Image: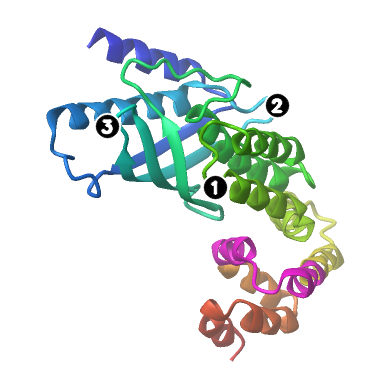
Amino acid sequence: MLQFIFRTLLILSFAIGQITDFNLTIDSRNIINNQNLYITTYLDKLKEDLEFYVLSNNFLQTNKELNISLDASITIESISDNRVISAYVLFSNGLDQLLFSDGVDFKYTLGDNLLYSTTYNSLTSFLDYNIFIMIAGELDKHNYKGGENYYIRAENIALKGTLSEYPRKWNRRLKKCKEIKDNTSLRKIKYIYVEINKYLDNSNEEFNDDLIIEYLENIYEELVTIDSQYGYNKETIIYLNSIKEGLVDLCLDYHMKYLIKFLTEYDKDNAEFYNESIN
């Protein structure tokens, strides 16, 4: 009980610049002896330690205050005799970012003290990689390419991972991070969309409709660029799905149906929604 109280107080002491909510599930159904008492205790302690690590460390080295909520799902494939866990892991902010690792190996032993450090660790560095990308995506909304430093930090972790004792799929994660960072058009769209809403919320009597139109035209141009450079882009589709109602309302208010028609072709999963909005 005292340990629980101490941990709770310590988490609450990090009120700014950290992950404010972390929902973690661990699926061990693929393990034959998953009902073994030791394995049950081992996985319960892993979950507890991961939650504490994510919630109690300050990952955000900036004065900007962000409220970041994360979901993570770990599906365990196997646990070796020397406690190397092989798993599939999904990270999401529940809105517009999703990272899936279709295979990662990390070592966890009961009694491990998980420390936040630049020194590579198969478990904590994997967590940091995902968290840094999530933070980068949030910072991109507040400043154009505002998350650059955090994408670079995630890249550096991934590079270390490729050279580590457990290099499984780190090459793929390095490539994914570079792809997200290099998609400057999507990063610009995120920033512009937030700027539109900030302007709408805080505008004075000298409201300028032309500014909103210019912003929307920029979004259209960047979407066309994404289409020409990448074609279907999963990160763009996920982001569009998170803003589609608000974006369509803006397009209708400012007579920009051509942007909606473009989305009908690009975001085919939501084509019916877009078509209904202009019919």
**68 left or right of 260 in image:** left
Looking at the rendered image, the disc whose residue lies closer to the viewer, 2 or 1, is 1
Instruction: Kindly identify which residue carries mark 3.
Output: 43
Relative to 111, say whether 79 is above or below.
Answer: below
Image coordinates of residue 236 in percent, x first then y, are 64, 64
Q: Which residue type does callout 3 highlight? A: Leu
The residue that appears at 64% across and 67% down in the rendered structure is: 233
Badge 1 crowding class, 10 Å Cα cut-off, few under 14, some 14 to 19, many 20 or more, is some
* Residue contact at pointers 3 and 1, CB within 8 angstroms: no
165 and 127: which one is in front? 165
Image coordinates of residue 57 in percent, x first then y, are 52, 22
Please give the range of residues in magenta: 221-243
Q: Which residue type does callout 2 highlight? A: Thr
- Identify the image quadrant of residue 11: top left
Q: Residue furthest bottom?
A: 279
Image coordinates of residue 229 in percent, x first then y, are 78, 70
Instruction: Kindly identify which residue carries mark 1.
Output: 169
263 and 173: which one is in front? 173
Q: Earlier in the sequence, mark 3 or mark 1?
A: 3
